[in-house]
Image (cartoon, rainbow, N blue to C red):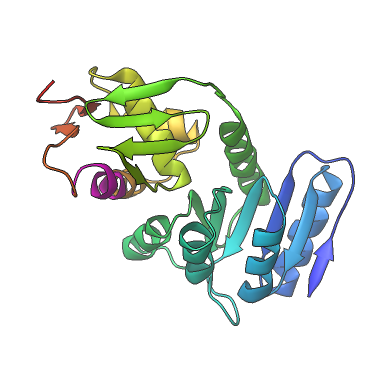
Amino acid sequence: MIMSSKSHSAGSVLLVEDHQDIAEMLFSYFEQRGYMLDYAADGEVGMRLATENQYDVIILDLMLPRVDGLEVCRRLRKEFGKTTPVLMLTARDTLEDKITGLDVGADDYLVKPFEVQELEARIRALIRRSGRDVSTEVLKVGDLTFDTSTFEVKRNGQILSLSPVGFKLLKVLMKATPRLVSRREIERSIWGDLPPDSDALRSHLYNLRKVIDRPFSSTLLHTVQSQGYRMYDPDG
């Protein structure tokens, strides 16, 4: 099933949700508030729409027919290179489930049942963050470079692949180098006033380290116990 709303838009949203009552409630609410929506009731159709069209945000249910939300998100990131912000809806609220969702590339998550006003606030925040701070500067720490206009990250000449949150996290840390950046400062830069729980940042930092540090001989991302994080080149 595919539904679509094409009107003056506060943002374009793809909703992938198999529960009909939830989908109709969200579709009605966001359509009335000026959003442009496409809708799919299973992961296969949702993935096709996400790869064929441009959206500001994808709302992705975790448990879906045909292809589940984790696999949809993973394939959008890894196979198709899509950087569209993904907000995952889940009835599972365990730490392991949240970290798994973030690990495959989700930017945010919301546990069912939820208030639709909070969902809208998180969508607005994702749209705002994905479109702001456009610049053409090239950030550099040691042999790591980040072209913020093309989102090309390289270390030792090797192109690195990051999630959308990974790009934002790296930009915050590289722009501050070598200054210490507190957890709270990082969270506000990435999620504004609606951060997920503390495990979200930990998971994203772990994934960032795996990409920018683990395959290389020196460490650039350093933890300062109980204070925060900073990027610097120990050999520089």
Depicted 116 relative to depicted 173: above or below = below
On the image, the x and y values in percent for residue 133 come to 55, 23
Observer-nearest of 96 and 56? 56
**For the N terminus, which image quadrant?**
bottom right
- Residue at image position (66%, 60%) is 50
> Of all residues shown, which one is farthest toward the right?
7
Residue 185 visible in image? no
Q: Is residue 85 visible?
A: yes
Magenta segment's dominant SS is helix
Q: Is residue 122 above or below residue 184?
A: below
Residue found farthest to the front = 157
Q: Which of 8 and 44 is in front in this view?
A: 44
Residue furthest bottom in the image = 66
Quarter of the image where one finds residue 67: bottom right
With respect to residue 185, does 64 lie above or below? below
Instruction: Report whether 84 appears left or right of 204.
Output: right
Q: Quadrant of the C terminus?
A: top left
Q: What stretch is highlighted in magenta?
A: 206-214
Give the quadrant of residue 130.
top right
Q: What residue is at 11 percent from the left and 42 percent from the top?
A: 217
Q: Residue at x 48, y 54 (%)?
A: 106
Q: Residue 114 in magenta?
A: no
> Is residue 2 rendered to the left or right of residue 96?
right
Quadrant assignment, res 141: top left
- Give the camera-side residue of 220 and 196: 220
Residue 39: image location, x then y, percent: 75, 64
Percent x, y of residue 223: 17, 34
| Tally of numbered tags | 0
Residue under the image location 39 percent in, 42 percent down: 166
Q: Is residue 74 depicted above or below 224 in this figure?
A: below
